[in-house]
């Protein structure tokens, strides 16, 4: 897999395991760097060129107001009432569809669909 993922602390562990089982290179903040700040998560993503997977809406502010710009992008999931492996399965299916270019974008996934806001 060419895409390297960074699962934020709030991304379910069962989803991390699912993505790893599908061959993705996934770094899990909850397992490897528990308790670090969102800014530190951004720094890891930028340095290691990873796509961030998060349920934390603060990442939009970090991108657009604090000017953290991870080249691989950020996926912000706004899901309710889901099984713990569902976010991983959803991300996997979206990546495999090759419909979206996550780079330099905040991608929001919710019950209404998927939308993106690009940044430079």
Image (tube, rainbow, N blue to C red):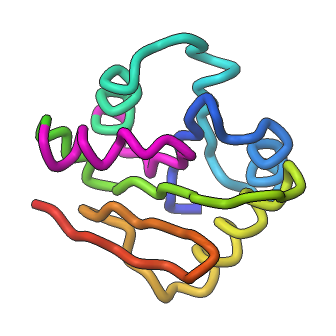
In magenta, the rendered stretch is 47-65
Residue 33 location, x and y as percent?
56, 15
Q: Nearer the viewer, residue 113 or 74?
A: 113
Quadrant the C terminus occupies: bottom left
* Residue 57 vertical placement versus 33 (above, below): below
Residue 70 location, x and y as percent?
27, 46
Is residue 61 in the magenta section? Answer: yes
Quadrant the N terminus occupies: bottom right
Q: Nearer the viewer, residue 118 or 18?
A: 118
Q: Nearer the viewer, residue 6 or 21?
A: 6
**Is 1 situated left or right of 58 in this image?**
right
**Is 18 situated left or right of 95 in this image?**
right
Is residue 68 in the magenta section? Answer: no
* Residue 100 vertical placement versus 27 (above, below): below
- At x 21%, y 69%, the residue is 118
- At x 43%, y 46%, the residue is 57
Q: Nearer the viewer, residue 80 or 60?
A: 80
Residue farthest toward the top in the current orientation of the protein: 35
- At x 56%, y 46%, the residue is 55
- At x 40%, y 53%, the residue is 74
* Residue 15 vertical placement versus 93 (above, below): above
* Residue 34 vertical placement versus 99 (above, below): above
Residue 48 location, x and y as percent?
37, 36
**Is 89 situated left or right of 78 in this image?**
right
């Amino acid at each position: 897999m060419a895409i390297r993922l960074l699962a934020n602390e709030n991304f379910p562990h069962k989803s991390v395991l699912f993505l790893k089982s599908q061959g993705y290179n996934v770094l899990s903040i909850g397992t490897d760097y528990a308790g670090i700040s969102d800014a530190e998560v951004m720094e890891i993503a930028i340095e290691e060129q990873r796509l961030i997977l998060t349920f934390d809406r603060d990442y939009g502010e970090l991108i657009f107001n604090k000017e953290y710009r991870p080249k691989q992008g950020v996926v912000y999931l706004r899901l309710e009432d889901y099984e713990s492996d569902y976010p991983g399965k959803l991300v996997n299916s979206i990546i495999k569809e090759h419909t979206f270019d996550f780079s330099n974008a905040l991608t929001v996934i919710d019950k209404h669909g998927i939308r993106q806001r690009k940044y430079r």
